[in-house]
Amino acid sequence: MSCRTFKNFKFKDLEVSIDEIDKIKYVDKFQEKQIDALYLVLNANIKMQKYIDYYVSSHDLDLDTAYTDVIQEYQNKRKGVYLAIFKNNPVGLKMMQKQFKLSPQQLSSIMYSVNLNGFCTPNNFRSQNYIFAEIKTKYINDDLIIVLKGDLLIDKEYLVIIDIINYFEIRIALEITKL
């Protein structure tokens, strides 16, 4: 199994001067499904900031469950995406392997890419799109591995979740300084 991590471009007999480099842009036409997915992601991201503000200010935080609560709330607000969360330790990886019925070779390949690039989007992996990604955490011992699954995924949607977690950690830090 291999992971798609970078887009490769090959051009035959292409010459570009230094002056022209600034003018080169990558343009990709969005399909209708991608526009719908982008709308869902942006809408969920806006709602998550409000949710985190409320969550941090009105709860006695148990940090072991708080990260999971925030990520699960993203799944609820995002719609059309299944999210699984695992700790990046041997027990969590074993649970991920069992839940997604991964062979040891598939797990090793995915985790190699996740450890190297921060994410893995497997090629030809089942019928739906999957993204495996690592989220570095500030307030709990083990980092998290998230698995996004769905038909309406954006290539780098895991970055939105990382951004949400960063915002969550900033809000926690602000609450701590208030005490």
Image (spheres, rainbow, N blue to C red):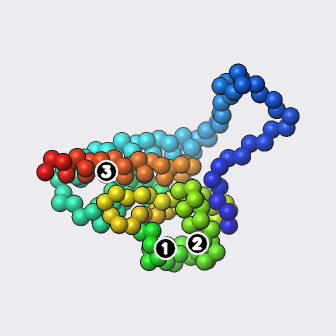
Q: Position of residue 113 (x, y in %)?
A: 60, 61
Q: Where is mark 1, residue-wise? A: 93
| Res 111 quadrant in image | bottom right
Q: Position of residue 7 (x, y in %)?
A: 67, 47
Tags 3 and 1 touching, CB below 8 Å: no
Q: Where is mark 3, residue-wise? A: 168
**Looking at the image, which residue is at 56% across and 76% down?**
101
Work out which quarter of the rendered image holds the N terminus and state it.
bottom right
**Looking at the image, which residue is at 54% across and 72% down?**
100
Tags 1 and 2 touching, CB below 8 Å: yes
Q: Confirm whether residue 155 shows in the render.
A: yes
For label 1, count other residues whose C-alpha is less than 10 Å away and answer few (under 14), some (14-19) or many (20+).
Answer: some
User: How many numbered marks are there?
Assistant: 3
Between 85 and 39, the residue placed more toward the observer is: 85
Q: Amino acid at mark 2?
A: Leu
Q: Secondary structure at mark 1?
A: helix
Instruction: Report the Cα–Cα distance between label 3 and label 2.
Output: 29 Å
- Residue sticking out furthest to the left: 179
Instruction: Report the Cα–Cα distance between label 1 and label 2.
Output: 8 Å
Q: Position of residue 171 (x, y in %)?
A: 26, 48
Q: Amino acid at mark 1?
A: Leu
Between 80 and 15, the residue placed more toward the observer is: 15
Q: Where is mark 2, residue-wise? A: 107
Tell me if residue 116 comes above or below residue 52 in the rendering. below
Q: Secondary structure at mark 2?
A: helix
Judge from the rendering whether residue 26 lies leftward or rightward of residue 178; answer left or right.
Answer: right
